[in-house]
Amino acid sequence: QVHLVESGGGLVQPGGSLRLSCGVSGTIFSIDGMGWHRQAPGKERELVAAVTSAGSTNYADSVKGRFTIARDNTKNTVYLHMNSLKSEDTGVYYCYVHSFDSSGARYDYWGQGTQVTVSS
């Protein structure tokens, strides 16, 4: 069984910083892309940041210059460093992993979600 274990959410004041972590529990043959989505109250889930196996990154326009995604392939972990947080960054953050097994079949895994609240 593969699970993604998230940590690092919480309450922070506007302008503050948080670091989210997402580690893979269990065995995956090959990890491809990793990333983070978020869902704000009353809104649809949206992609926040993604990183490919080659290290290429992609960010939502709303977080460019403030958030940084990074992955540690030795630990099968992806991080989201969030700086200059704004109230509109509030939401539940979900990590994901795109993976393949030895036959080339693709499997996608999602974390349970971690709450980020930006408020004074």
Image (cartoon, rainbow, N blue to C red):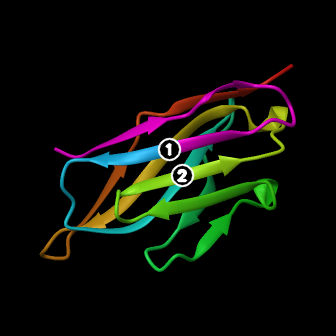
Seen in the picture, residue 10 relative to 112 is either above or below; the reply is above
Q: Secondary structure at mark 1?
A: strand
- The quarter of the picture where residue 16 lies is top right
- Crowding at dot 1, Cα within 10 Å, few <14 / some 14-19 / many 20+, comes out as many
Instruction: Give residue 23's position: percent from left, percent from top.
Output: 38, 47
Q: Which residue is mark 1?
A: 21
Residue visible at 61% across and 71% down in the picture: 57
Residue visible at 55% across and 34% down in the picture: 8
* Residue 74 in sight from this viewpoint: yes
Instruction: Give residue 82's position: percent from left, percent from top.
Output: 71, 46
Q: Are marks 1 and 2 in contact (CB under 8 Å)?
A: yes
Task: Identify the amino acid type marked 1.
Answer: Ser
84 relative to 99 in the view: left or right: right
Instruction: Give residue 49's position: percent from left, percent from top.
Output: 62, 58
Q: Which residue is mark 2?
A: 79
Instruction: Give residue 4's position: percent from left, percent from top.
Output: 35, 43
Seen in the picture, residue 33 relative to 89 is either above or below; the reply is below
Please provide the residue range marked out in magenta.
1-20
- The quarter of the picture where residue 106 lies is bottom left
Residue 3 is one of the magenta-drawn residues: yes
Task: Identify the amino acid type marked 2.
Answer: Tyr
Which is more N-terminal, label 2 or label 1? 1
Which quadrant: the C terminus? top right
Which quadrant: the N terminus? top left
* Residue 45 in sight from this viewpoint: no
